[in-house]
């Protein structure tokens, strides 16, 4: 899996600041036309395991957007919009034309007058970096896309200016295509409308954060969960920061539906690692892998893989055999990120920590993605189609059905097949 990602083409889509009032409809109006076009373009360029990796970077300027609840809402709705567009256009693993879309946000930083990025803004601490970090990333993008609007064009030109003073001609000479996509309408209002109540603990950043899951056939729900976990980390601490990713061991999954299509632990660990290193590398030049350590057996857990980054961040991938995992064996963990559907697990973890005399974890919830306001279908139909993008079980089912069809000799051209 890791080798296929290295060969996959990587594209970047720059999105200007979101509308002040964030909802699925306002994001669809602002970004929908451009997202629709680039996802179809990326789908056409994807073939089997070599699917296009599409980095989607959203600018922001208002500090209020960076509250945990606001970021979660923005990224969750954008992932939902992407899934709705993919469902509508039959962009899916079933047709060998899926797209690996990844969302990050970054501080706009540089002004429209192309001020140098070495000013005050570049010294501020943002969990997901700024325009300078993004533009100076060593990510090997093959296509750079922007929207047709004045804010988007200014953003693109600032990006090119920072990226070694590159011009469009220079980028093309380096075989990097630049594409402008249809822009939408973005309405900005007073920033006071963005203000939302947030738990005092959610304003506190942590040095050691944990999350757990199966992470089988990594999908949009997993990506949102992992991104929000990284967001909880304290960006001001250079050393001692740790992300702990509990990944369900193979034995825990033996009763899962379509078990034969389940990825084993090494595949799931590599997929999570590749995603996390990918998004972290876009937002800080120091988030570069220094070395990796593998451990076969670490009772009471199983296999572990540790990534040591040059920034001082350590990412631990731990094979777990029971739901609480490292949260009840590692006292240094201070925060837990989980999906809203498993929020009861936070209470169980804190009860067990309390029995040991340990401090309770701050629990951060991530909303479950759903079909929402999908176009053209009833809610039931939309939910059924949407689950194919955010349900590992449904992904395994469709992979199984595809393999059965293949073995029966009825493959044809998978990109020509369309079904509900």
Image (cartoon, rainbow, N blue to C red):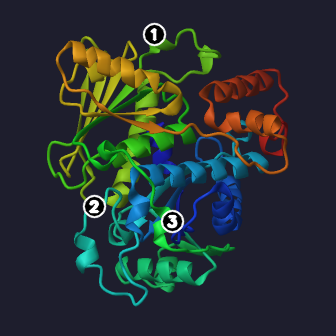
- Which of pointers 1 and 3 indicates the residue nearer the eye? 3
Q: In the image shown, does 372 or 53 lie closer to the viewer?
A: 372
Q: Position of residue 125 (x, y in %)?
A: 25, 62
Q: CA distance from mark 1 to mark 2?
A: 38 Å
Tell me if label 2 and label 3 are in contact, CB under 8 Å: no
Query: Can you name the residue that lies furthest to the left here?
Result: 239
| Residue shown at the point (60%, 48%) measured from the top left | 51
Helix, strand or loop at label 2? It is loop
Helix, strand or loop at label 3? It is helix
Reply above or below: 381 against 54: above
Q: Position of residue 318 (x, y in %)?
A: 32, 24
| Residue shown at the point (47%, 75%) measured from the top left | 174
| Residue shown at the point (57%, 9%) measured from the top left | 255
Q: Which residue is mark 3?
A: 193
Q: Is residue 158 shown left or right of residue 74?
A: left
Q: Quadrant of residue 365?
A: top left
Q: Position of residue 185 (x, y in %)?
A: 67, 74
Q: Which mark is residue 251?
A: 1
Which is more N-terminal, label 2 or label 1? 1
Q: In the image shown, does 91 or 185 lie closer to the viewer?
A: 185
């Amino acid at each position: 899996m890791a080798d296929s990602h290295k060969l996959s083409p990587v594209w970047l889509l720059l999105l200007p600041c979101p509308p002040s009032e964030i909802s699925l409809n306002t994001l669809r109006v602002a970004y929908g036309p451009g997202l629709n076009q680039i996802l179809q373009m990326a789908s056409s360029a994807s073939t089997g395991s070599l699917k296009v990796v599409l980095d989607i970077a959203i600018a922001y300027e208002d500090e209020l957007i960076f509250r945990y609840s606001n970021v979660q809402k923005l990224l969750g709705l954008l992932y939902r919009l992407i899934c709705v567009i993919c469902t509508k256009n039959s962009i899916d693993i079933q047709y060998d034309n899926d797209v690996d879309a990844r969302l990050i946000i970054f501080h706009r930083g540089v002004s429209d007058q192309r001020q140098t990025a070495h000013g005050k803004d570049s010294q501020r601490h943002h969990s997901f970096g700024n325009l300078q970090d993004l533009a100076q990333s060593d990510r090997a993008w093959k296509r750079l896309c922007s929207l047709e609007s004045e804010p988007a064009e200014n953003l693109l030109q600032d990006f090119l200016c920072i990226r070694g003073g590159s011009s469009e001609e220079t980028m093309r000479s380096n075989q990097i295509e630049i594409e402008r996509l249809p822009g939408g309408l973005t309405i900005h209002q007073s920033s006071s409308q963005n203000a939302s109540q947030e738990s005092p603990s959610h304003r506190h950043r942590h040095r050691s954060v944990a999350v757990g899951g199966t992470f089988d056939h990594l999908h949009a729900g997993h990506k949102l969960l992992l991104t929000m976990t990284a967001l909880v980390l304290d960006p001001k601490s250079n050393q001692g920061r740790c992300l702990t990713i509990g990944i369900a061991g193979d034995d825990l999954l033996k009763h899962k539906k379509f078990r034969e299509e389940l990825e084993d632990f090494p595949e799931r660990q590599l997929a999570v690692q590749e995603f996390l290193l990918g998004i972290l590398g876009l937002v800080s030049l120091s988030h570069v892998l220094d070395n990796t350590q593998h451990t076969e057996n670490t009772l009471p857990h199983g296999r572990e893989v540790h990534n040591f980054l040059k920034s001082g961040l350590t990412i631990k991938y731990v094979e777990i055999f029971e739901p609480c995992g490292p949260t009840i064996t590692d006292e240094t963990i201070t925060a837990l990120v989980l999906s809203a559907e498993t929020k009861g697990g936070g209470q169980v973890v804190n009860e067990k920590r309390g029995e040991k005399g340990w401090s309770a974890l701050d629990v951060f919830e991530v909303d479950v993605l759903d079909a929402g306001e999908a176009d053209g279908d009833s809610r039931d139909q939309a939910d059924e189609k949407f689950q194919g993008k955010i349900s590992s079980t449904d992904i395994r089912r469709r992979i199984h059905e595809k393999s059965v069809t293949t073995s029966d000799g009825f493959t044809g051209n998978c990109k020509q097949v369309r079904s509900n």
